[in-house]
Image (cartoon, rainbow, N blue to C red):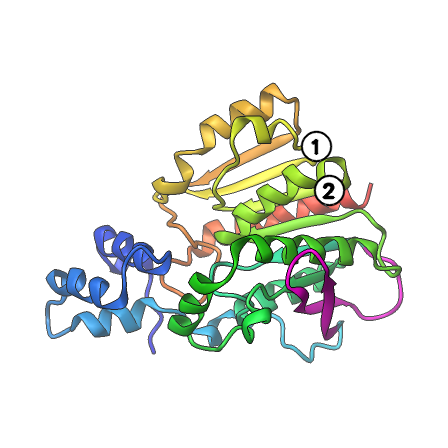
Amino acid sequence: MERKKASDFPQELLNLFDGYVHGRMSRREFLNGAEKFAVGGVSATALWEMLKPNYAWAIQVQPDDKRIATDRVTVPSPQGSGSIKGYFARPAGDAKVPPIIVIHENRGLNPYIEDVARRLAVANFMAFAPDGLSPYGGYPGDEEKATAMFQQADPAKMQEDLYASALWVKARPDGTGKLGAIGFCFGGTTVNNIAVRMGANLAAAVPFYGAQPKAEDAAKIKAPINCQYGELDTRITSGWPAFDTALTDAKVTHEGHIYKGANHGFHNDTTPRYDEVAAKEAWGRAIDWFNKYLRA
């Protein structure tokens, strides 16, 4: 399928799709709302097909890339579901490198997030990307099934599983012990929550378009945090000024970047919401942030 850009679609339609992606409406409700944009022989279903992920586009680092080593592991989570499965990637060789926890969107561990882990390994970090859906059978390879599984999952147990994953990768003997955290959408929100919970035990955080914690929780953050937002993602980005103030008041080292004309999900290179310029700039900032605070 030809790759489309966000600019190929009306913003109202992209906002409608955002509602579908985040479970605020069913596929049928999205299709009903998309009918008014179905012109020129393009049906609402065809629009849905154009907007949904194409994971072939996400592969920037091949799974068998000789520069890295990967594995699928199971991590204990005694306070959560008992255990959680995930995807581990690190540079080839046995040198100690900084660990980073990678938290997925609200679909589980899909091929895009696995590739993010490999990208971090190429950048000389070890990355663990847990699958919050693994206690329920794991990411099913189908977006609608993943959405349904996510909505049925126990959110408190999932947060405990993801937290256990962060502790596991931080404690690995082939790592340096200085933990970083990166996440997208649901994962960005979770990274913010992990930063609150871990305090000084987290060394750096880069949440992408994650919902912000309350001011009293933000005051517990100790890790340098670099937040990435899309200008058009007003649902999430509108919370940045208050978060910025709370972090400033708490004397937390932080930055916030809002990418002009970018939508929610702009880093995810499997959908038309992907913004190549914003994604590359934000990724560069993430790597620079981790290099600065995890290697010091």
In the rendered structure, are the residues bearing label 2 and label 1 in contact, judged by CB atoms less than 8 Å apart? yes
> Regarding mark 1 in the picture, which secondary structure is present there?
loop
Indicate the position of residue 263 as horizontal and vertical percent values: 37, 50
Depth order, front residue of 82/41: 82
* Residue located 50% across and 37% down the image: 212
Q: Evaluate whether residue 285 shows in this view.
A: no
Above or below, comparing residue 82 to residue 192 in the picture: below
Q: Evaluate whether residue 247 shows in this view.
A: yes
Above or below, comparing residue 187 to residue 146 in the picture: above
Mark 1: few/some/many CA within 10 Å (<14, 14-19, 20+): many
* Residue located 85% across and 52% down the image: 176
* Residue located 39% across and 48% down the image: 262
Depth order, front residue of 53/143: 143
Q: Is residue 291 left or right of residue 268?
A: right
| Residue 212 numbered tag | none
> Total of numbered circles in the picture?
2
> What's the distance in space between the residues labelled 2 and 1, CA to CA?
8 Å
The residue wearing badge 2 is 202
> Regarding mark 2 in the picture, which secondary structure is present there?
loop
Give the quarter of the image for residue 266.
bottom left
Q: Which residues are magenta?
A: 70-97
Mark 2: few/some/many CA within 10 Å (<14, 14-19, 20+): many
Give the quarter of the image for residue 265.
bottom left
Above or below, comparing residue 197 to residue 96 in the picture: above
Give the quarter of the image for residue 68.
bottom right
Depth order, front residue of 222/286: 222
The residue wearing badge 1 is 222
* Residue located 76% across and 59% down the image: 124
Which amino acid, mark 1?
Answer: Lys
